[in-house]
Image (tube, grey):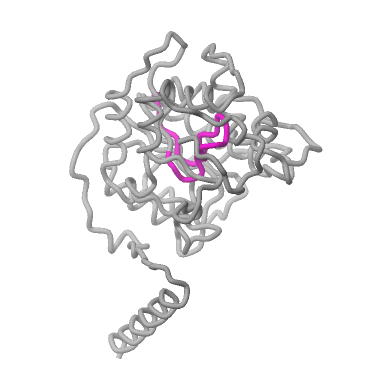
Amino acid sequence: MKTTIYKTIWTVRNFLLEAIEKKEKIFLTYISRPSNSNYFETQKTVTISPRCGIVLQGQLLKDRDFTLETIRIYKKIFPEAEIIVSTWKDEDQELIEKIKKEKVNILLNDKPKYGGGTWQPNVNLQIVSSFSGIKMAKKLGCEYVLKTRTDQRIYNSNTLRLFYNLTEKFPIATSHNQKKRIVGVSLNTFTYRMYGLSDMNVFGSIDDMMLFWGVDLDNRRGYDIKDISLREFAHLQVCEVYFVTEFLKKIGRNLKWTLRDSWEVFAEHLCIVDQQTIGLYWHKYEKHNEYRHPQYYCEKTDKEMNFSEWLEIYSNLQNLKINENILDLRFGEKTSIASL
């Protein structure tokens, strides 16, 4: 009976997808992933030599036991890693006890008095929970650490090895006080947002990550980012830009606040991996719309930087003609002249 119902649902779904494709003159695809660790059969295929930690920071996601199942999956695909859950004292106690039974490290932090402004309400929550988790990773002897979120899940079992290999294959070539390249993900890393490495998934050496996340709480109030240009947004140093620019100051790099200088920072200090490469899933917002900023029809200022673009910047920045005027546009506007 159940099999018949499921077949009917899938038939109807395919019919609707094809109808939408024909009407809108597009192609639609979908991706299915196991939501429960019991159905997750992929096992670790390679090992990572340096000791690595994974910090899952933020509010525990109870919907479909998302955070709990993520922990169980990570225990399967990253068996050598130290898993650290950095969350809050006021979280659901029953769920906390279930996580403790998984024999992972769990930190219950006090929330900061001020979470953040209207346009970045969780910035201080992220600072507190991330830095707390990374300090524990250092205490546990981790040489590298991946900071991720409790509402996101990585499905590629080779992710840690990939990130580590990138830090080895693309060493830091400057004299700044940075040990290894910091690796981020394309999701929410925007090409035209100056110094805007996405803060969702960040990997690096433990000392660099201590510097990156060991920033002061952002207690600013009263500013507005609505209808402002990309240039104005960057100068406000909101969220991701705040983290990257504060890190750059700590390692002794001066900022020029140009698009070229931003791309030079990506070329010399950072690296970008496509979210598809690591099988990243975000159980929030438009969860059924994974690729939120496609650039198939025209190029816009909300274009996400992918690995191929990062590699072009890394390899050929001196020959790129960069249109600095793009910074005077607002986020999501069409660009008349592509810079990359």
Identify the main secondary structure in magenta: loop
Which region of the structure is painted magenta? 185-206
Regarding residue 206, the answer to whether it shows in the image is: no
The residue sitting at 58% across, 38% down in the picture is: 126
* The image quarter in which residue 274 lies: top left
Q: Position of residue 10 (x, y in %)?
A: 34, 80
In which quadrant is the N terminus drawn? bottom left
The residue sitting at 33% across, 62% down in the picture is: 34
Q: Position of residue 50 (x, y in %)?
A: 28, 26
Q: Compared to 297, does 315 lie above or below? A: above
Q: Position of residue 161 (x, y in %)?
A: 27, 35
The residue sitting at 55% across, 28% down in the picture is: 259
Q: Nearer the viewer, residue 156 or 259?
A: 259
Residue farthest along the bottom direction in this orientation? 1
Q: Is residue 51 left or right of residue 281?
A: left
The residue sitting at 50% across, 39% down in the picture is: 338
Q: Nearer the viewer, residue 203 or 311?
A: 311
Q: Compared to 66, does 74 lie above or below? A: above
Q: Is residue 220 left or right of residue 71?
A: right
* The image quarter in which residue 55 lies: top left
Q: Compared to 292, does 53 lie above or below? A: above
Residue farthest along the top direction in this orientation? 175
Q: Position of residue 183 (x, y in %)?
A: 40, 32
In which quadrant is the C terminus drawn? top left
Magenta stretch: includes residue 199: yes
Residue farthest along the right direction in this orientation? 222
Regarding residue 322, the answer to whether it shows in the image is: yes
Q: Nearer the viewer, residue 292 or 103?
A: 292
Magenta stretch: includes residue 246: no
